[in-house]
Image (cartoon, rainbow, N blue to C red):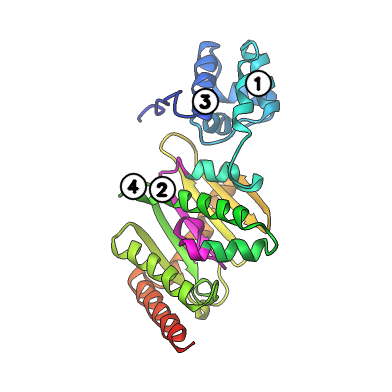
């Protein structure tokens, strides 16, 4: 079994903290579980901190300094992690997403952020914040498009998305915006950069009716699930919970249209939006 991936401490403050935490823990002769127990953290959570998947909190940094005799190292450097361009409820999930090897996502209402076009993202943010300054929305859109650059790599992460049919039909930004957005997804699928399926309305009840679900796996840390509702998000690392969400995703995918059928449906709906736009 391969050992943990070596982190480049210069790549980010979080990588620096993770690498230093691993070094000091091993120097102290502690297992990940040994270090986590006084903080009521699981060994897998400590592993996620060490691999840079999870963000260290200030109260954790204080305890690590105390347990490992780090002379304030973790507290001093933890402050560098506080600033984020993402909303607080999503910041840690976005950072984990950037390190993920595979991402599987069920989207019940909106095209996932990694797949959004500029016009679609702008329409979403204006809907969220109808009285915001244009500069504020510009910054939010730029950040979302920057996230999408994860897909510039030809192979990693492996992205498998199940879109509810409502995502295809909901007219976000108008027919022209929707036609462009759906064609963008189709292009990525035809290039075999992503796997996409559609859960049709005819599928009826399914295992993820309660909301959006994102599952992330990593080469050097346990998997995570991310759950989100309006303005609230939670990363779940408990193995039993993640396994339950993993099964829910598998059931949704199994009951969705095949990738080929889904791609055909996406193309048909995009064409319908194009025709509607031309009639306006």
Q: Secondary structure at mark 2?
A: helix
Residue 171, x across and y down, in percent = 54, 76
First reached walking from the N terminus: tag 3 or tag 4: 3
In three-dimensional space, the C-alpha distance between marks 1 and 2, rounded to whole angstroms, equals 30 Å
Q: Quadrant of residue 195?
A: bottom left
Crowdedness of circle 1 by 10 Å Cα count: few (<14), some, many (20+)?
many
Q: Can residue 30 be seen in this snapshot?
A: yes
Is 115 in the magenta? yes
In three-dimensional space, the C-alpha distance between marks 4 and 1, rounded to whole angstroms, equals 34 Å
Q: Are marks 2 and 4 in contact (CB under 8 Å)?
A: yes
In three-dimensional space, the C-alpha distance between marks 2 and 4, rounded to whole angstroms, equals 6 Å
In three-dimensional space, the C-alpha distance between marks 3 and 2, rounded to whole angstroms, equals 22 Å
- Label annotation for residue 270: none
Residue that carries the numbered disc 3 in the rendered image:
18
Give the number of the mark in front: 3 or 4: 4
- Label annotation for residue 153: 4
Crowdedness of circle 2 by 10 Å Cα count: few (<14), some, many (20+)?
some
- In this figure, what is the number of numbered marks? 4
């Amino acid at each position: 079994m391969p050992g943990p991936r070596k982190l480049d401490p210069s790549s980010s403050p979080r990588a620096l903290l993770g690498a230093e935490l691993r070094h000091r823990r091993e120097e102290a002769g502690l297992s990940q579980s040994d270090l986590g127990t006084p903080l009521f953290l699981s060994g897998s959570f400590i592993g996620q901190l060490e691999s840079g998947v999870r963000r260290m909190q200030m109260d954790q940094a204080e305890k690590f300094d105390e347990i490992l005799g780090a002379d304030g190292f973790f507290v001093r450097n933890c402050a560098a992690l506080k600033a984020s361009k993402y909303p607080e409820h999503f910041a840690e999930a976005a950072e984990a997403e950037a390190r993920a090897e595979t991402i599987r996502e069920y989207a019940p209402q909106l095209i996932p952020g990694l797949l959004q076009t500029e016009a679609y993202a702008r329409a979403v943010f204006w809907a969220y914040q109808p009285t915001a300054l244009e500069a504020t929305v510009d910054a939010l859109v730029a950040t979302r498009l920057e996230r999408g650059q994860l897909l510039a790599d030809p192979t990693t992460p492996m992205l498998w998305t199940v879109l509810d049919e409502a995502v295809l039909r909901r007219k976000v930004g108008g027919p022209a915006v929707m036609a462009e957005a759906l064609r963008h997804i189709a292009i990525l699928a035809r290039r075999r950069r992503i796997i996409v399926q559609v859960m049709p309305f005819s599928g009826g009840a399914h295992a993820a009716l309660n909301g959006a679900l994102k599952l992330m796996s990593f080469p050097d840390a346990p998997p995570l699930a991310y759950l989100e509702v309006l303005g609230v998000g939670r990363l779940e690392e408990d193995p039993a919970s993640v396994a339950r969400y993993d099964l829910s995703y598998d059931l949704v995918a199994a009951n969705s249209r095949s990738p080929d059928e889904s791609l055909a449906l996406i193309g048909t709906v995009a064409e319908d939006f194009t025709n509607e736009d031309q009639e306006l």
